[in-house]
Image (tube, rainbow, N blue to C red):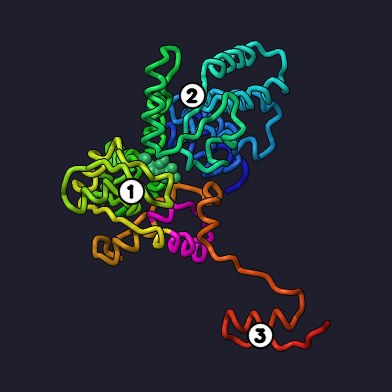
Amino acid sequence: MAKDDVNSAVERYISSGRSEKDVERKEHYFKMALQIQPKNIRALNNMGLLLQQKGEFREAISYYEIILDLGVVTKPSPIYYNIAVCLKRLGNLEGAKTYINRALAKKPDEEIFLELKEEILDLLNGTPSAVLPHTTPKASDIGAPYGEWDPPAIAVDGTYDDANRLASEVADQNPDWAFVNINIRPYYTEGSRTLAFETAEQLGWNAPDHIVAPLGSGALLCALTRGYSELENIGLIDSGKNVRISGSQPTGCSPISTAVQNDAEVIPIRELDTIAHSLAIGNPADGYYAKQAIQNSNGYAASVTNEEILDAILLLARTEGIFTEPAGGTTVAGLKNLVESGHIDPEERTVVYVTGNGLKAQETIAGALDSPGSIKPTYSEFTNTFRNITKEQAPTCQEVN
Ligand SMILES: Cc1ncc(COP(=O)(O)O)c(C=O)c1O
């Protein structure tokens, strides 16, 4: 396509997106504009604003970040401002403060930035502390190492369930304090649906036959189910409602999988024993609905051991070059389990959700992996070691020492 054609196609899509009232269509037009010209700043920005408007803040941030990564904007301050607004809505006030400071550094006298800064500082002062289970990785994806937070983070000797219970008790006792987890939950669920949108888009606007999702509270699996169904409702894909939904949980914490396997109620458990800390929720808030979604779609749920999770992490790293944390290992191990037990047909187009980056849980994974060891920097040590590892003859070449 000639350059002028590309530009006019992009303009056409963008203006259709601007004039259309239907939000889903707008999103489609902006995405088309981006496909034609991936660096289109206006379409990227419009997508960010649209998602922000829809309350899909995490997604919106990723579009703004692409603009910043491209390094072509002359005035990044509005983008910093938008990111700050999204982070604030996600409850990440420290992150929001950082971006607002960056925006102010670019445009120090802008009143609107100062107002947002005041608002964020007020909220920060009013937030006494964050309560986390002690197993939360120190450099987790929340945006900052939690040991460095101010106001302070307090690690609880217990599970997510214990931390949630304590946090709500603290909020109950202190009328000025809030239990933020419940407040931000709607955004988490709404945002998670976009995993279904992205999958359908990457499959050329088709639904997969079967998916495998990790199960903690069960919210993500329910959101995926809803995402596929909504895409069918608006006519972007066929058979979104026929996707078979399966889940996977670690055996040391598998109330939902156990309920599916026994066709029984979800029974909360107190003693959790798993390396998949991000899935270690003994009392899953959406367990009932997740079980229903799985059974209504003719899916199933696997329970996988720590060993299987670690093997799956290594398998994914070796075969796909993707380093995941144990939640991703749980779904990959779950896939293997479900295929072997006949619940997934190898002919089905199956999508496995690998939801967590391995860097987030290095502390958990590192201890469980073998160290490769080291050798002296000589050619003979290399050839001996190479032979031992591979049982193959080392390359024949004269040693030079
Ligand atoms: C990396 C990761 N994947 C999956 C999940 C499971 O999500 P849900 O609690 O919605 O079932 C979580 C939960 O926090 C998670 O941290």
> Is there any visible trace of residue 263 in the rendered image?
yes
Residue 382, image x, y percentages: 70, 79
Q: Of the two numbered discs 3 and 1 on the same chain, state the one appearing first in sequence.
A: 1
Which residue type carries mark 2? Arg
Q: Which of 87 and 145 is in front in this view?
A: 145
Most foreground residue, 211 or 70:
211
Write the start and end of the magenta stretch as one range.
Answer: 310-331
Which three-letter amino acid code belongs to the residue tagged 1? Cys
Other-residue count near label 2 (Cα within 10 Å), few / some / many at <14 / 14–19 / ≥20: some
318 shown above or below 142:
below
Name the foreground residue: 79 vs 98. 98
Q: Image quadrant of residue 170?
A: top left
The extreme left residue here reads 263
Q: How crowded is mark 3: few (under 14 residues within 10 Å), some or many (20 or more)?
A: some
**Cα–Cα gap, marks 2 and 1:** 31 Å
**At numbered mark 1, what does the secondary structure look like: helix, strand or loop?**
helix
Please give the residue where the numbered disc 3 appears in the rendered image. 394
Q: Given the current orientation, which residue lies at the most extreme right position?
A: 401
For the point 58% across and 31% down, the residue is: 42
Q: Is the magenta stretch mostly helix, strand or loop?
A: helix
| Membership of 287 in magenta stretch | no
Mark 2, residue position:
89
